[in-house]
């Protein structure tokens, strides 16, 4: 049901080849057919450490539930309350705030658990620094058990797998299906990690992707270049910098997400000023009517009537609850691939 060769780390979905992704998606859909809350076994005696340096609702709850249903358990740690700041730079003179290095924490925790899932903090000052994903990569370098990225600056592979599962479940075969990803206004924009991972995953699946955003909200240059490379290799359309209407017209799915401007990254005053100039970017029924009977997706949390209207979010087009549920099933498939026989 899952890929024969185990995943070493899941820092980015690009760590997995397309055959492995397909195997995980097949397993996800099969696992979903099991009775709700059933103890599926398979990981009895296994444990996963969950380390959160930022808040979480769906990721934390779905991973804990997934391990429980597979017969294993989690050790849940939150940096703000359960431990301390960690240093990630190699060769550091550690005379600052951090009393411990990731190297030491990773090697010790690897003796306690069978895998570690990490949601690292973001510096929030410099995109050129944060985009390196130094912390999650330091964990993957020094841990002797698999590392799972629960959302870094650049990637959110767990969300992308649940999104692919939802798309397959809803649309069937994905090649040639049309996906519109649109920026939305929000007073608390998220990182671009979800959109980075979704964009590349959808293109790898053969979907035609249209990316809508105002000027100044372009994605990371490396991600954009990789998206163009995949689209060219697969001979599928990919367009970016569109208006929401241009992206949504004829689409099978509209995926809304607010993300930070990388041009203003680290400068909240300029970022707020730029957002205030783009207040009309919200998904409503008028936009959805331009689609090809399109469905609506959002990774949540979502600001109602700011990013999307209640009418769309609570309406028959919305997949958001199904999408969130699928985090549970796709993560079970990941855990079995990592830790199962």
Image (cartoon, rainbow, N blue to C red):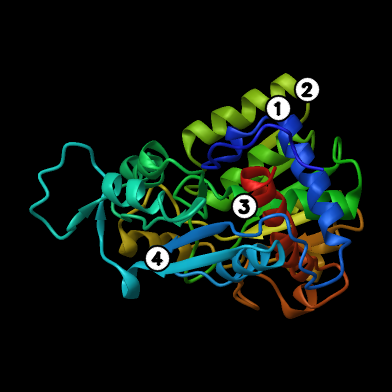
Q: Position of residue 227 (x, y in %)?
A: 62, 32
Image coordinates of residue 56 in percent, x first then y, are 51, 69
- Closer to the camera: disc 2 or disc 3? 3
Separation of marks 4 and 2 at Cα, in angstroms: 38 Å
Please state, as top left, top right, bottom left or bottom right, where the C terminus lies in the image.
top right
Query: 246 or 176: which is nearer to us?
Result: 176
Q: Which one is in front, 255 or 77?
A: 77
Can residue 151 be seen? Answer: yes
Mark 4, residues whose alpha carbon is within 10 Å: few (<14), some, or many (≥20)? some
Q: Nearer the viewer, mark 3 or mark 1?
A: 3
| Quarter assignment of residue 16 | top right
**Gap between marks 3 and 1, in whole Å?**
22 Å
In the depicted structure, whether residue 330 falls above or below residue 275:
above
Residue drawn at the location 45% of the way across and 70% of the way down: 55
In this figure, which residue is indicated by the disc labeled 4? 272
Q: How far separated are the C-alphas under marks 2 and 1?
A: 6 Å
């Amino acid at each position: 049901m899952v890929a024969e060769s185990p995943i070493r780390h899941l820092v980015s979905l690009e760590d997995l080849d397309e055959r492995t992704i397909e195997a995980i998606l097949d397993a996800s859909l099969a696992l979903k057919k099991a009775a709700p809350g059933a103890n599926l076994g398979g990981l009895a005696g296994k444990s996963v450490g969950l380390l959160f340096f930022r808040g979480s609702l769906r990721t934390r709850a779905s991973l804990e539930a997934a391990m429980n249903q597979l017969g294993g358990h989690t050790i849940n740690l939150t940096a703000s309350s359960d431990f301390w700041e960690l240093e990630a730079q190699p060769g550091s003179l550690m005379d600052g705030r951090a009393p411990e290095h990731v190297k030491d924490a990773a090697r010790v925790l690897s003796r306690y658990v069978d895998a570690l899932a990490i949601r690292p903090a973001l510096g929030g000052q410099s995109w050129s620094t944060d985009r390196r994903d130094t912390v999650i990569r330091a964990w993957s370098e020094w841990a002797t058990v698999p590392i799972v990225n629960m959302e870094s600056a650049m990637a959110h592979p767990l969300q992308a797998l649940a999104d692919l599962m939802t798309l397959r479940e809803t649309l069937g075969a994905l090649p040639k299906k049309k996906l519109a990803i649109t920026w939305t206004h929000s007073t608390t924009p998220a990182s671009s990690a979800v959109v980075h991972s979704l964009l590349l995953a959808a293109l790898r699946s053969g979907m035609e992707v249209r990316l809508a955003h105002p000027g100044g909200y372009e994605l990371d240059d490396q991600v954009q270049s990789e998206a163009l490379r995949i689209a060219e290799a697969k001979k599928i359309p990919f367009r970016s910098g569109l208006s929401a209407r241009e992206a949504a017209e004829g689409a099978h799915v509209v995926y809304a997400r607010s993300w930070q401007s990388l041009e203003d990254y680290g400068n909240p005053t300029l970022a707020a000023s730029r957002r205030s100039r783009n207040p009309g970017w919200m998904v409503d029924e008028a936009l959805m009517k331009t689609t090809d009977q399109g469905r609506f997706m959002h990774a949540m949390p979502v600001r109602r009537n700011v990013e999307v209207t209640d009418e769309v979010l609570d309406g028959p087009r919305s997949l958001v609850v199904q999408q969130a549920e699928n985090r549970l099933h796709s993560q079970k498939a990941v855990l079995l691939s990592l830790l199962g026989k």
